[in-house]
Amino acid sequence: MSTDESTKTICPYCGVGCGISVRQGDEPGDVSFAPWGEAPVNEGRVCIKGGAATEVVDHEDRLTEPMIREDGDLRPASWDEALSRVVAEMEDIRDEHGPDGMGFYASSKTMNEENYLLQKLARRFGTNNVDNCTRMCHASTVYALRESLGAGAMTNSMADLRDEADVFWIQGANPGEQHPIANSQYFRQAVLDGATVIQVDPHANKTTESFEIEESDRHMHLQLEPGTDIPLLNAVLKTVLDNGWVDEEFVAERTEGIEDLRETLADFDKEAAAEECGVPLEDIERAAEAYATADNAAIFTGMGMSQHACGVDNVQNEINLALATGNLGRPGTGVNPLRGQNNVQGASDVGAMPNVLPGYQPVDDDEAREAVEDVWGFEIPSEPGLTNVEITHSVGDTVHGLYVMGENPVMSEPNADRVADLLDETEFVVVQDIFPTETVEYADVVLPATTWAERGGTVTNTDRRVQRMRGVEKVHEDTRHDLDILTEVGTRLFGEDAGFDFDGPEEVFEELREVCPIYHGMTYDALGEEGLHWPCYEPGDEGDQFLYADSFDTPSGRGQIEGVRHQPPRETPDDEYPLILTTARLEEHYNTGTMSRRSATLSRQHPENFVDVHPEDAERFGVADGDSVTLRSRRGEITLRANVTEAIKEGVVWTTPHFADASANVLTNDVLDERAKIPEYKAAAVDVTLADGG
Ligand code: SF4
């Protein structure tokens, strides 16, 4: 490897998919960040996470050799011993409990090829119990989009939105914090050029700040109570219906269900809804007019919408608004989920979900399943499997073994203390990762993997752009690429000719293309440095910047409108737990912090967790800014620093899941949306008190 050249790859953090370069020094592990000036998404700009991404590659905490638990402790082992143990334990579980005795966690942080191979491994083992972190972030969005429009992804692309959207409706998303380059380079640019932004969020945040542009009145912040998104959007929809702002031609030709919406809202009381939301009705009406009368209006949706027990209905109401006003099927419009992790879109695209095969083909669709079976050469179970939270909750009942690739359920799932207890009871846990995560504490076998910078493959960003990652030299001799580990586990489990013997990621991608229609037209050569947006059905297709120009991908070809009614969060404040906790992430950290907490640059910005408390609540509970406080829910408690601020609404507190010693997920509620099975991370009842010595 030349010391002068740098290797073009993709940032390992958020779903924007910025291109970065990694410069290789004289020694393995001697790597540094370099800008990639022509990168298609970001043209060389990066946020603090992208610039610091190489800091974790040669971190002292790296897992450097396989380990096996013996007499309660992990001890070093050879790869042969570790993999023999994995295979023997998995076979024992299958013999004793059947294939559904295993659950497989794919990773939204690993590449398409690796996730493809993990879900194939699960299905060859005989189970559909395989899922990825999309379950925790946008499962409800994907469900609603698939049912009502056709594809579980952004309808548009960042570029067409920047160039064509006149109104940006951003609800339950904080791109200023979570997707900094998309926010600065695309959305803020559009607002500087004259677009209006309407932000709907309980928290004033970096997105709010980023749009406060020189006294411009083109920014509105509707600061609603957590869990009142449906009444707020219903007030918007009622305003649209009452003022004749429905796009009648679009609705007649391209949608179904407007009558259901009219019936649902016939007696809807906007005044009462506005009061429930805590937002003045005139502001809601002004926002409705701006959206509905714009030439092109786009909705952006985030986890503030999806992470609720009514997450599917939340997103359905956004779809209702877009369809009723004809804001779909052309540039600058649509319903656009902002995906959190650099490959959460791709992990789902390639079938690492319990109900779909690659390309979102339902596993219970005989024709689709048989087409995949023809390529794979084995029978795929036809019943959808368990989601990741369901897998965890089934430990000791139907699930007895877990294969965890690049995921940290002990911190990422809600009600984390319960998750830890369940993992403790699991007969066999194998963890494949780069660092000793909190989940490694429950592992029977640990398989050390290479980092994002050391290997190649593809990832799919938030606007469906599939891009290639490229690797530099491996840092630790005894680590292996995820793909190579899965190849060997599959071959050991099922034999030489069982379809797991691949010579590198491109060979895997070639097979993926055969079973994934939306990727079928792509090759590594065609992806080049620009990447391609799916769907890309045939070689030579250039991919689609926006979806549904002529019809929706539903059985009737029409977009589905369906009225929805308010469902309060499952936990609401009471005397014992008088506050509502809502959660979100910080720009400088990433999910459970496995990588970002180990980055000196990122940790310096935010070394510890904190909780935002409104000044009125601080006074009510005797808390001062900087005090150490204990937050307590029905599921557990954490101690952290109080940040007294008017950025949060009275009656609401806000914290993050990033820090192992005080993670929000000790407190969060593990109740699920019935259809999408996403947990209600965004609303839990809590109490705050001064901690000992606070
Ligand atoms: Fe990486 Fe996202 Fe930052 Fe871009 S915006 S550099 S993809 S973390």
Image: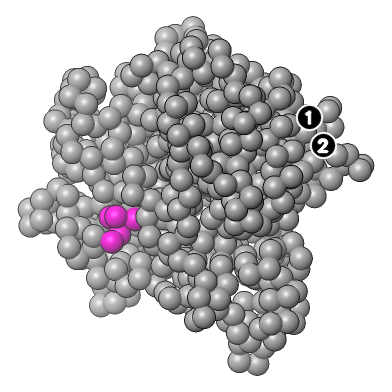
Amino acid carrying label 2: it is Arg
Q: Label 2: which residue?
A: 218
Secondary-structure class at tag 1: loop
Give amino acid for label 1. Ala
What is the x, y in percent for residue 15?
Answer: 57, 39
Q: Mark 1 points at which residue?
A: 195
**Picture layout, residue 42 above or below residue 127:** above
Asked if the residue under mark 2 is in contact with the one under mark 1, i.e. CB atoms within 8 Å, the reply is yes
Q: Quarter of the image for the C terminus: give it.
A: bottom right
Name the residue nearer the viewer: 452 or 581.
581
Q: Give the residue at x 57% y 72%.
A: 579
Is 370 rendered above or below residue 687?
Answer: above
Gap between marks 1 and 2 measured at Cα: 7 Å
Answer few, some or many: residues within 10 Å of disc 2's Cα (few below 14, many 20 plus, some between 14 and 19).
some
Examine the residues drawn in magenta and state their main secondary structure: helix
Residue, far bottom: 693
Q: Give the range drawn in magenta.
A: 389-393
- Of the image marks 1 and 2, the number of the one nearer the N terminus: 1
Q: Where is residue 612 in the image (x, y as percent from the top left)?
A: 68, 68
226 or 378, nearer to the observer: 226
Q: Where is residue 137 in the image (x, y as percent from the top left)?
A: 48, 48
